Amino acid sequence: MDLGRKLSHFSIYACFNGHRMATATVVPTLISREGRGSRRSLCTLVQNELHDVKLILLVSFKGLVISTATRSIVQKLGSAVKEVARTKGSSWWHTPHMAAASLAIAERIPLVDFVLEVRDSRIPLSSECSQLGDLLSSSRRIIVLNKIDLAKQSAMKEWTEYFNQERSLAFGVNAHNKENIREFLNFLQARARELLKTGHSGETIILMLVGIPNVGKSALANALHQVGRISTLEKGKSKHASVSPQPGETKNISSLKIASHPNIYVLDTPGILPPEIFGDELCSKLACIGAIRDCIVGKNDLAHYFLAVLNLSQEYKKWSKFSAMENVRSSIYQEEELSESSHMDKRQYATDHTQDFIVNDVRRTLFEAVSTFSGDLENDKYLEQLIEVESRMLRNAFRITQSGADGHTKFAIKLLDLCRTGRLGHYVLDDIPRIS
């Protein structure tokens, strides 16, 4: 298979002075120039392009077969993000407020005992907080893979093992699962006791949550605080950090107590991004999980990006049962429509896209659209056709009556909400780097 058709990008990571950092994304022109070739020849090509820097290349080939159609969407999203960064045309990123937050975090790193770098489990590498750089040793950093409930479970164990092999402590959490948070708190307390045995001055341990926007730092801080108070039977008014599905909600650094004996406090910090993000694929992944506000990249293009990811995955096959149940579901829904007392309830119920019967209708629609499509999804033309068909069908599944741009935007908002809450499958968009 022609590599230019099979892959649009693959990620390059360099080990420079012992620190792994993202250095480049191979652009399609390099791949098309190579044409047919092996992994070895493609690696050699990239190494030649980056001959000025001595690198150990870690090449991560994407698990999904990404066609040129997906590449065009990725390029569009990436261009939108980079244009905002170039012109400073956002009231949210990278503002003086975010720059000040970055400086405040850097100043506090030497003063805290551990830094909990919170990442999104769906993009364990792409959600790395690049500003941490060499500001702390690996022994003081714990990588927290949050939102494991939204990621593909079979991949999470492999990711944890990967980070451990890289000599980085890693722990997967779901901030909304009390048992999981209690397990994570026990893990943190064990690390704190180990630190105290080494001659740590004082009896208080300070942790600091750091990460890009919208990875769940504040939700995690609140969960640790609540579980910690219950475990120690502490009395008094409970504190909490502000939480929002929109990135950039946290404005200040706040402190919450999460344990006693020893006393452990966690600092919740604002999400930070670098002034510029290089690489269209990285921009697209950050936008897909909501780390970059939708208004910067456009909801419609984001919805198309998610549909491309879904179409090239196997997630839709899980929803075959909804197609078989369609006749039964339709008859039940018709009976509800005939109920005289449910007129107002039905109108409200049918417009709420989070209701189970609508979610299942969306799943059925996606299953039928992908499974019956006869075109080659590695071909840009056919993938675009499928996305257009799905967009029209999903507007009906979502009960959207508006036409034109307004209807399409409403469809995009509903689709992205279901995607980001895990109701349309679980995905890990990054692949584990393989040493070449």
Image (cartoon, helix red, strand yellow):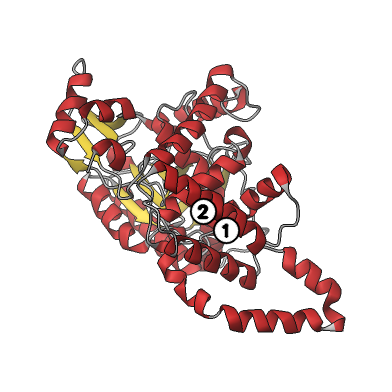
Q: Position of residue 32 (x, y in %)?
A: 27, 29
- Compared to 428, does 36 lie above or below? above
Q: Is residue 46 above or below residue 412?
A: above
Report crowding for label 2: few under 14, some 14 to 19, many 20 or more residues within 10 A (C-alpha): many
Residue in the picture at 57% in, 70% down = 360
Whether residue 206 appears in this view of the structure is no
In which quadrant of the rendered image does the N terminus lie? top left
Q: Residue 404: name its quadrant.
A: top right
- On the image, the x and y values in percent for residue 307 come to 49, 51
What is the quadrant of the C terminus in the image? Answer: top left
The image shows residue 344, relative to residue 151, as above or below, that is below
Q: Give the x, y percent position of residue 314.
A: 37, 61
Left or right, 135 with reference to 57 = right
Q: Is residue 320 visible?
A: yes
Q: Which residue is mark 1?
A: 418
Q: Position of residue 423 (x, y in %)?
A: 53, 63
68 vs 214, left or right, is: left
- Measure how far apart labels 2 and 1 are at the Cα level: 22 Å
Kind of residue at disc 2: Leu
Labels 2 and 1: the sequence-earlier one: 2
Quarter assignment of residue 45 = top left
- In percent of the image, x 36 and y 63: which residue is there? 153
* Residue 220: image tag: 2
Question: Does dot 2 land on a helix, a strand or a loop?
Answer: helix
Which amino acid type is shown beneath numbered disc 1? Leu
